[in-house]
Amino acid sequence: MAVSLKQINVKDPELREVQQNVADAVQALAAEESPAVGVISVSSNQKLVGNEDVVLVDASTSTSEIALVLPGPRLLRKLLTVKVTKAGSNPVRIKATDIPATGSPTIDGNASAAIPAGSATALRIVSDGRNYWTL
């Protein structure tokens, strides 16, 4: 990304220094490569920790439902995509919590969301800090 900054001539040396520091910071940010994306691959139950961006699920060999347990809603600070790469005969279930109880977080008002058996599709999830929502 190319960045051009207009520098204004000023007489105050401190203001010039601030101006230069801002220009240097903008240039450094522009030169930075995009951050790494956290991708994990699973084929069995998994507790997520919140640093995942994408969970790739191979459900083709599973003999039962694959459960992915989300981290606490305050720990999920970005969009999470769960993608079934190889469908199987059992669903992939995304759970809001390991053991649901009154007042527990929900996903769209439910204890869990599922990607149906035989479906190689994706589900995107975000958190508002208290609950989860599918997109």
Image: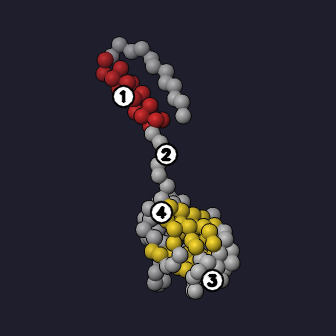
Q: Which mark is residue 121?
A: none
Distance CA(mark 1)–CA(mark 3): 56 Å
**Toward the viewer: 12 or 91?**
91
Q: Circle 2 sits on which residue? A: 34
| Residue type, mark 1 in image | Asn
Which quarter shows the C terminus?
A: bottom right
Distance CA(mark 2)–CA(mark 4): 16 Å
Which quarter shows the N terminus?
A: top right
Q: Residue at x 45, y 19 (%)?
A: 7
Q: Residue at x 65, y 83 (%)?
A: 89
Residue 13 seen in the figure: yes
Q: Circle 1 sits on which residue? A: 21
| Residue type, mark 3 in image | Asn
Q: Are marks 3 and 4 in contact (CB under 8 Å)?
A: no
Q: Residues within 10 Å of mark 3 (few under 14, many from 20)?
A: some
Q: Circle 3 sits on which residue? A: 90
Mark in front: 2 vs 1: 2
Distance CA(mark 1)–CA(mark 4): 34 Å
Q: Residues within 10 Å of mark 2 (few under 14, many from 20)?
A: few
Mark in front: 3 vs 4: 3
Q: Are marks 2 and 1 in contact (CB under 8 Å)?
A: no
If you read the primary sequence from the N terminus, does the residue marked by circle 3 or circle 4 appear first?
Answer: 4
Q: Residue furthest front?
A: 61
Q: Residues within 10 Å of mark 1 (few under 14, many from 20)?
A: few
Mark in front: 1 vs 3: 3
If you read the primary sequence from the N terminus, does the residue marked by circle 1 or circle 4 appear first?
Answer: 1
| Residue type, mark 2 in image | Ser
Q: Circle 4 sits on which residue? A: 52
Where in the figure is residue 65, as x and y percent of width and height? 57, 83
